[in-house]
Image (tube, helix red, strand yellow):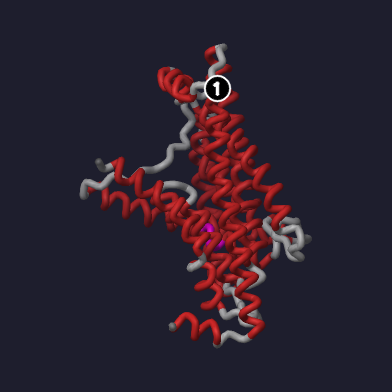
Amino acid sequence: MTTKKSVSMLTPEKQQEKKLLTIDCVKISLLLILYNLLNRIFAVLFFYVAYTYHSGKFTLSYSAVLSYLKKQTAFISSTTFSMTANLFITLMSVLVFGIVFAILFRKRESSFIKPKKGTAVKGLKWFSACFVINILLSQLISILTGILGQNGVTVPTSDFSIHQPSAIAVIVQFSYVVIIAPIVEEFIYRGAILTALSPYGRGAAVLFSALAFGLMHGNIPQAASAFGTGLVYAIIAAKCGSILPTVIIHCLNNLLANFSSISDAIGLEHYETFMSVAEIVIGLVGFMVLFTSLKKLIIDDSENVLTPKECRRYVFTNPATIVYMLCLIIPIIKSLVQANS
C-alpha cells in the first residue's frame, strides 16, 4: 500500500525517469552477469586448449581434461599458465561484452569510454592520492585480517607472485596485470556502468560501480580495498567524463603493486631503495593532493530529475541488481567457509 502511494506521488517526469532507469539498470546488470558467465565459458575453452597443447591429444570429455591437468602440477601452477589463462579469458569475454554493450547503449549521448582532452593530466594528478588511499586501506585490512587470523579465522587472499620465473612469465604477467586488466576493468566497471547509470544520478552510478568492482575481486581483503579505490576511480571518471584518467591511475597503481615480484623475477638489484624513495615521494604528493583537492571529489546530483536517495533506492532494489550482487557475494562466502572448514 505504501509503495503504491509513493509511486503515485511521483510526478510524470519522475515516473518516466524511474522507468528508464529501471530498464537501463536491468540491461547493465544482465550484461555484467553475462560477462561473469563468459569468463566461465572461456575458462573451460582454455582448459581444452591447454590440454590439447600439453598432451598432444584431443578429447570432448571435460572431466578427462580436468583430471589430466590436475596431474600436471608444475604446468598449471606456473605464472605463465595462470596469466595466459587470464589474458585469454579476459580478452575473449570483454570482446563479447563490448559488442553487446555497444548494441544495448548505442543511442547513449554521453559515453565515458571515449577519451577526452586534458583528462590524462588529471589522471596523473590523482594517481598519487589514489596511491595513498590504497596504502591506507591495505594497512587497515592487513590489521583486520591479522586479528581474524589470531582468532582462528582464515581469510582467503590472491597470490600474484611469479612462480617458475622466466622471460615469458614476466612478460605475460606484466601484460595482464599492468596493461590489459586495468584497461578492461576500467572499461567495464567505470566506462560501461557510468555510461548506463550516470544520466540518472552520478552518485548511485559511482556506488554501483565501486561495489561491483570490489566484489568481483573474489576475496574479502581485495574486495574491501578495491571498493575504496573503486569509489575514488569512479568519482574521478564521473568528474572527468572519461575513463582515460582512471586507466592511467589503475595501470600505474598495478605497476607499483607488482614491481617487487617482477623485479625479483628478472633479477633486478637494489630495487628496494628505488621503491622506498618512490613510495615516499608519491605518498607526500598524494597527501598534499588529498588535503588541497578533497572537496573536488564531492558529486552534486541536485539538478537531476530523481533525487540521489530515489536513484540509489531504484538502483539497489532492482531485481537484476540484486541477482548480480548475489552472483558476486556468494562465491566470496563459499571461499571463506571452505578456508575455515
Label 1: how many residues lie within 10 Å, few (<14), some (14-19) or many (20+)?
some
Please, is residue 200 above or below residue 179 in the view? below
| Quarter of image, res 11 | bottom right
Q: Which residue is at 61% across, 30% downward? A: 171
Is residue 216 in view from this perspective? yes
Residue 299 image position (x, y, % from top left): 59, 74
Horizontal side, residue 283 vs residue 16: left or right: left
Q: Which residue extends farthest right?
A: 117
Residue 89 image position (x, y, % from top left): 58, 36
Residue 69 vs residue 33, the one in the foreground = 33
Residue 159 image position (x, y, % from top left): 43, 37
Please, is residue 186 above or below residue 86 in the view? below
Q: Amino acid at mark 1?
A: Ala
Residue 309 vs residue 183, the one in the foreground = 309
Horizontal side, residue 257 vs residue 191: left or right: left
Q: Which residue is mark 1?
A: 50
Q: Please identify the quadrant where the C terminus is shown.
A: top left
Horizontal side, residue 335 vs residue 128: left or right: left
Q: Is residue 139 magenta?
A: no
Name the element at disc 1.
helix
Range covered by the magenta-colored residues? 228-232
Q: Which residue is at 29% across, 49% downward? A: 146
Q: Please identify the quadrant where the N terminus is shown.
A: bottom left
| Quarter of image, res 106 | bottom right
Q: Which residue is at 42% across, 22% downward? A: 70
